[in-house]
Each structure stands twice: as C-alpha cells, then as structure tokens.
Image (tube, grey):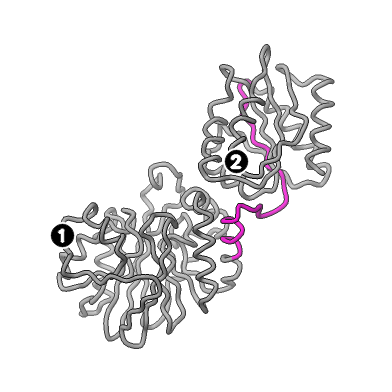
C-alpha cells in the first residue's frame, strides 16, 4: 500500500497526515490520512489537485522537488473540499502564471475558498472535453454529488490512469500496512454512501474506459486487480450486502440486554452462521454503519430508555437512515422492565428505509431472559436463518 511510483512522467507529490485524530472532525482515523496530489510532466506540466492546509509547506516542498526547476502550466481541480483545496491559494502565489483547469461549478464555488481573482486563469471544461499536454491527453468526466456537486474525474488517455477524486479512497496514511477493504468501506459508506445512484452513474462512465491504474485523493495508488475494487464500489453503491452474515448490534443499559444478545449470537454461530456482535456503547456509530452495510442481515437488541431507545442506538439508527441503508432483513429484540417500547421506536425509525424486512417475532424481554422470551428468541433465530 506504500508504493508511490506511478510512471516516469507522472509523480506522486501528496503527503501523509499522522497527527490528525478525527477526519472531518467526526471519523476516528487511528492511522491518519493521506492527502494525495499528483504531477504530470510533459510539454506542459500539470498539478492534479492540492492538499489540506495542514500540510501546505510539506506539499509545496514535494512539488518543487519534483518540478526540477520547471514551472507548472496547469492546476486541475477535481474537488473543492478543504482537504484538497487547502493549498490552492499558496500554490497560485508561488506560480502566478499557472492556469486553472476545472468545470463551471468549481469556478462558481472557488471564491469561497481563496481570495485571489482567477478570472483570467480559468480553463473551463465540460463532460468529455480533453486537454493535450504533449504525449499525454487528459479527458474530463463530470461526477456531480460524488460527493459534492462540483466533483470531476480525470482520465489520462496515454497511460490509462483514472484520477478518481474521492472515489476509491480510504482512511489511513500510505505507509500504513493494512487491508484496503475495511477502511475503504468505512470511508465510502460514511463519506459517499448517501449518493449511491450518482456513484452508479460514474461507474457506467468508467466502464467505457480502459483503466490500468486508479489514483484517488486519499489512500493507495491502485495498480492491480482493479476489478476487485470496482466491483466493491458497485456493490456498496447498489446498497447490496458484501457477504452473507448477521450483524448483532446491542444497546444495553445494565448488561441484561447484552447477555441476551450474546446468547442470540452464540446460538446463531452454532448453526454455522457468520455473526458479528457489536456493543453500540463502545463502538463509534460510523464504524457500526460500515459493518451494517457489509452483512446481509442485522439484529438490533436494545433496551427501552425514557420510552425511547438507548441513546447510542438512537444515534446509530439516525446515521443508518442518513446513509440510505436498504435491502436488508432485520430482527429486533427489545427490553424493558415495566413498559418495553424499543421495538416500536426501532420499527418507526426504520420505516422510511427502502426494502427493509422486519423479521418476526419482535422478542420482548422484561429485564432478564426467561423461558417465554427464550422461546421467542429461538423462533427469531429460526426465522432469521430462512
């Protein structure tokens, strides 16, 4: 994952950020994040995006070293989110003759991000337009709402490289040795996941291209087995399960609901199911949402709390709705001493989601499991396996 070599004429000039703890001030990034940027050296010199202002000086150093005394002719802006546009102002001051290549929406938003007047530097491109810079030709692909309205991708026709903006990105620095899939899924579901239809549209456009390498704005350069990554994006953006299995998410106040969830998970595993149990109180909601998209089924075991549901479960379900979770089967185990109400609240919260099947029965526990509630739980176990 740490291989930064692209080709003789296309250089990686991005930076790793190992000091950040929360990406977008909400997603835990224990292994930091990479802000990727690229340089194409040809008759004309092109910078592909900048980086977060946290790393401007380091990035400018990487750029200057790779330029080897040349000046950039163009800056291509794929996406204006601050983690990629944060150094635009600085690089424009350093190379004032450089032109900016992007679409009309980028130029409409750009004054919100920089103070410089760039009206005399604009090169406006539309869907399918090309820019020849010598031996290389850049083809521009509009990707609105993946995941901002101004996003575009760039396909380099000669070396067949897709500069994919935030698509195919992941959390973690480039020198982090870890599987791509888990942090890429967590990144996709939480950052882009709401916009599955728009991702599908871009995948159809990409399907017409001969792609040999994918260079995203976060995460590693993807060089081999590209079908694996593209197929996962297709699955995630269709809101289809990545694999067969049951995610059990538990919100427990004093431990009784957790004991029931543990028994439920153990019984399912004994029937040769793949099961993952998560205590929602101890796992950040964005991480649980990522796991929910991974598996084909889910069971929510939750205590009634103030005639509502356990606060961490409440936050999780709100986030699940926000990310357009759909096409799943869900079981419910509720708990309550005098007025169990969690099942009703959960059903109401899930009701706006598409193609969600509630697996009956809803199991009601009054404080602790007893013979009656255990029998109902066994019935739910049987039905969730159908």
Q: Residue furthest bottom?
A: 135
Q: Which mark is residue 353?
A: 2
Q: Circle 1: is it few (<14), some (14-19), or many (20+) Cα within 10 Å?
A: few
What x and y, as percent, mark residue 178? 54, 58
Residue at 45% over, 44% down: 27
Residue at 31% over, 83% down: 133
**Is 56 colored magenta in this rendering?**
no
Residue at 15% over, 59% down: 116
Left or right of 96, for residue 353: right
The answer to which of 308 and 38 lies nearer the viewer is 308
Left or right of 245, for residue 252: left
Quadrant location, the C terminus = top right
What x and y, as percent, mark residue 286? 52, 42
The stretch in magenta equals 231-254
**Is 239 colored magenta in this rendering?**
yes
Q: Give the number of callouts.
A: 2
Q: Which mark is residue 116?
A: 1
Residue 308 vertical placement versus 151 (above, below): above
Residue 364 vertical placement versus 338 (above, below): below
| First of labels 1, 2 by sequence position | 1
What x and y, as percent, mark residue 22? 40, 44
Q: Residue furthest top?
A: 338
Q: Secondary structure at mark 2?
A: loop
Q: Circle 2: is it few (<14), some (14-19), or many (20+) Cα within 10 Å?
A: some
Q: Secondary structure at mark 1?
A: loop
Left or right of 164, for residue 99: left
Residue 369 vertical placement versus 247 (above, below): above
What x and y, as percent, mark residue 184? 52, 56
């Amino acid at each position: 994952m740490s291989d930064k070599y692209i080709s003789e004429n296309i250089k990686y000039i991005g930076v790793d950020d190992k000091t950040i703890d929360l990406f977008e001030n909400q997603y835990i990034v224990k292994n930091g994040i990479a802000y990727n940027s690229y340089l194409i050296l040809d008759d004309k010199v092109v910078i592909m995006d900048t980086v977060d202002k946290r790393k401007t000086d380091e990035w400018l150093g990487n750029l200057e070293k790779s330029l080897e005394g040349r000046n950039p002719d163009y800056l291509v802006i794929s996406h204006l989110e601050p983690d990629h546009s944060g150094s635009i102002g600085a690089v424009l001051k350093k190379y004032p003759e450089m032109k900016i290549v992007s679409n009309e929406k980028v130029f409409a938003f750009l004054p919100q991000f920089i103070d410089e007047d760039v009206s005399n530097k604009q090169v406006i491109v539309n869907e399918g337009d090309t820019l020849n810079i010598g031996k290389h030709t850049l083809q521009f692909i509009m990707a609105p709402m993946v995941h901002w309205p101004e996003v575009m991708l760039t396909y380099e026709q000669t070396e067949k490289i897709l500069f994919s903006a935030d698509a195919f990105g992941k959390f973690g620095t480039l020198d982090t040795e870890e599987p791509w899939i888990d942090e890429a899924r967590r990144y996709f579901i939480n950052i882009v996941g709401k916009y599955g239809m728009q991702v599908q549209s871009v995948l159809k456009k990409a399907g017409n291209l001969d792609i040999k390498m994918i260079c995203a704005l976060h995460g590693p350069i993807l060089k081999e087995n590209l079908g694996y990554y593209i197929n996962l994006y297709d699955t995630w953006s269709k809101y289809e399960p990545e694999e067969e299995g049951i995610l059990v998410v538990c919100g427990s106040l004093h431990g009784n609901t957790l004991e029931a969830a543990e028994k439920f998970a153990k019984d399912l595993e004994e029937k040769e199911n793949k099961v993952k149990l998560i205590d929602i109180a101890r796992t950040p909601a964005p991480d649980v949402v990522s796991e929910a998209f991974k598996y084909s089924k889910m069971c929510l075991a939750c205590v009634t709390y103030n005639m509502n549901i356990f606060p961490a479960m409440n936050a999780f379900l709100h986030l699940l709705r926000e990310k357009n979770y759909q096409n799943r089967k869900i079981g419910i185990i509720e708990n309550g001493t005098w007025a169990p109400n969690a099942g009703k609240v959960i059903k109401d919260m899930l009701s706006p989601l598409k193609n969600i099947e509630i697996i009956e029965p809803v199991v009601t526990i009054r404080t602790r499991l007893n013979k009656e509630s255990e029998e109902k739980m066994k019935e739910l176990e049987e039905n969730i396996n159908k």
